[in-house]
Amino acid sequence: MLIEAGARIKSKIRDSDTVARLGGDEFTVILPGLVDTSDIGHIAQGIIDLLSEPYFLNDRESYVSASIGIALYPDDATGSMELIRHADQAMYTAKNEGRGCFRYFIKTMQAAAKKKMQLASDLRHALAAGQFEVCYQPIIELDTGHIHKAEALLRWEHPDQGLISPVEFVPIAEDTGTIHDIGDWVFLQAAQQVKKLISSYGPGFQISVNKSPVQFIADDRGHNHWVETLEQMELPGQCIAVEITEGLLINNDAKVNKNLLTFRDAGIQVSIDDFGTGYSSLAYLKKFDIDYLKIDQSFVANLTEEAPEFALCEAIIVMAHKLGLKVIAEGVETTRQRDLLQQMGCDYGQGYLFSRPLPSSAFEQLLASRAIGATDTGSLARN
Ligand code: C2E
Ligand code: CA
Ligand code: CA
């Protein structure tokens, strides 16, 4: 395939140009002396189109896609190494923006790449330096208003830059492998927190922990590590739920399968996060013994009686219930959204309407104030 791809790239450029494979599946093309730089876009698109045509290898048809990063000399770099590096950064941008496209290097990419490298190195020390905190966002049972679930959400207080969103640093932690230690630490915090809550409110309390595909797949220690932690703490599996995304189940990876079974055997429940944004395939929901669907925030944000999201939410809820799953709506910000979801039969709601993610002590206070308000304190944690 590499030989064929190289030949296809060559067919799209002049004899005086250069094609080189620098490593893996990455090629470099040098186009010297271009009079009109607007040609570059056409050439790049031509290469992308040709590379995405089918390949016939060993009587089998295969497909690949290509992403291209473009850097210009002398505008973007003063030397060849810098030129290649900047083309590389532009290529990563192309990959991140959906693949199968080309992107020009722009100065801001360099700044972004620098910032990312700095954050990656800061992340290595963040855990030991005590810069992380786990916040808890309550998940409300819509019919009763009771709280017996919460989601653990990680916060990073950077010494110079202040609070950095997990949306920004989790992908970097995944790329650099620090996510494993950080993820285990989050799990331990959540387990300690739920132990405390169970002693106050009874055994029905559950905290969910996010686990990204990177953690799942590359985890050689297996989930037994988490399961063992629970055993050592004498906690029942049901007090923890693991939130995963749909993409993890699609590839039908044997390791993923085994890990999910280990969870099930330990009584740990599994939620599908951001449901509706990915493949939304029904087949795997039953196959993998999933317990909860979390309707993605984007559906809830646009929820009105007239919007297409209405039918989508309703369909997800009906389908989930038929399959024996419970539904949690994310990003509930208004009473109207809550009311509509409740009418549809949605089981749980989570969002700013009820509470933002809170530090441990504030979260405990919230639960305590609710428990005092209720006629039966035990009801707070009843399943
Ligand atoms: P997520 O798992 O989908 O988490 C829900 C996100 O929605 C959280 O953002 C939460 O603060 C936010 N949110 C909750 N209610 C509302 C609302 O009413 N409106 C709006 N607009 N947003 C709401 P956060 O805490 O910034 O986390 C972002 C993402 O980072 C999470 O998305 C999750 O994918 C990831 N993440 C957070 N903590 C961890 C962790 O410990 N491990 C891993 N692997 N990923 C984590
Ligand atoms: Ca989540
Ligand atoms: Ca989510």
Image (spheres, rainbow, N blue to C red):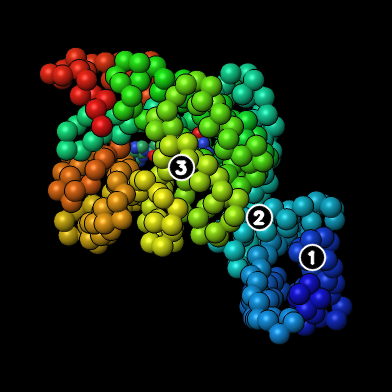
Residue type at the position of mark 1: Thr
- The structure residue drawn at horizontal position 85% and vertical position 81%, both measured from the top left corner, is 15
Point out residue 110 in the picture as x, y percentages from the top left corner: 68, 46
Judged from the image, the secondary structure of the residue bearing numbered disc 2 is helix
Q: Which one is in front, 319 or 342?
A: 319
Point out residue 339 in the picture as x, y percentages from the top left corner: 15, 43
Judged from the image, the secondary structure of the residue bearing numbered disc 1 is strand
Point out residue 222 in the picture as x, y percentages from the top left corner: 61, 39
Q: Is residue 185 visible?
A: yes
Mark number displayed over residue 264 = 3
Residue assigned mark 1: 28
Q: CA distance from mark 1 to mark 2?
A: 14 Å
Q: From the viewer's perspective, is 83 left or right of 47?
A: right
Residue type at the position of mark 3: Arg
Decide: marks 1, 2 in contact (CB < 8 A)? no
Point out residue 370 in the picture as x, y percentages from the top left corner: 21, 20
Q: Is residue 158 above or below residue 346?
A: above
- The structure residue drawn at horizontal position 68% and vertical position 81%, both measured from the top left corner, is 60
Mark number displayed over residue 92 = 2
Q: Is residue 72 above or below residue 163?
A: below
- The structure residue drawn at horizontal position 65% and vertical position 81%, both measured from the top left corner, is 61
